[in-house]
Image: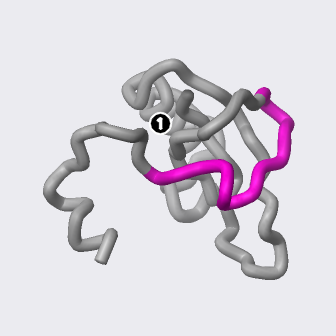
């Protein structure tokens, strides 16, 4: 399951709030675009990112980095993203 999470990348705050959940990356990307439009901010300024959640969650839940990954198992990673993984 994909989720939009609020992520300030603050080590002092390891828990991330789940903003919304989605059945596909495409739906999550659309939700992220709508959120950026609503807030009138870019992706970095709205501190929101798409992750693959390893278990069941709901909007409003708080999750730790252990419970999510950037990419789903077996998901094709776009070539431009490989440099960011190293």
Foreground pick, 64 / 18: 64
Residue at point 80%, 60% (across, down): 15
In the picture of the structure, the residue carrying the numbered disc 1 is: 33
Residue 64 magenta: yes
x and y, in percent, of residue 39 in the image? 64, 44
Residue at position x 83%, y 47% in the image = 62
User: Looking at this view, is 38 or 79 the one in front?
Assistant: 79
- On screen, residue 78 versus residue 23, left or right, reads left
The reply, left or right, for residue 21 in relation to residue 74 is: right
The segment highlighted magenta reads: 58-70
Look at the image and tell me in which quarter the C terminus lies: bottom left
Q: How many marks?
A: 1
Q: Quadrant of residue 3?
A: top right
> Is residue 77 located in the magenta-colored stretch of the structure?
no
Dot 1: element: helix
- Where is residue 56, by image quadrant? top right
Question: What residue lies at 67% left-to-right and 50% top-to-bottom?
Answer: 67
Residue 37 vertical position relative to residue 24 in the rendered view, above or below: below
Query: In screen coordinates, is 20 left or right of 71?
Result: right
Picture coordinates of residue 52 (x, y %)?
Answer: 52, 41
Residue at (53%, 45%) from the top-left corner?
Answer: 51
Q: Residue 70: give x, y in percent of width and height.
A: 46, 52
| Vertical side of 85 occupied by 4: above or below | above
Q: Position of residue 59 (x, y in %)?
A: 78, 30
User: Quick one: 50 or 71, which is closer to the camera?
Assistant: 71
Quarter of the image with the N terminus is: top right
Judging depth in this view, the residue of 30 and 20 nearest the camera is 20
């Amino acid at each position: 399951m994909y989720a939009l999470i609020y992520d300030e990348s603050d080590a002092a705050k390891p828990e991330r709030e789940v903003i919304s959940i989605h059945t596909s990356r495409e739906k999550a990307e659309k939700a992220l675009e709508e959120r950026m439009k609503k807030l009138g901010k870019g992706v970095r300024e709205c501190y929101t990112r798409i992750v693959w959640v390893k278990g069941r969650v709901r909007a409003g839940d708080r999750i730790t980095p252990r419970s999510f990954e950037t990419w789903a198992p077996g998901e094709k990673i776009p070539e431009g993203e490989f440099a960011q993984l190293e």
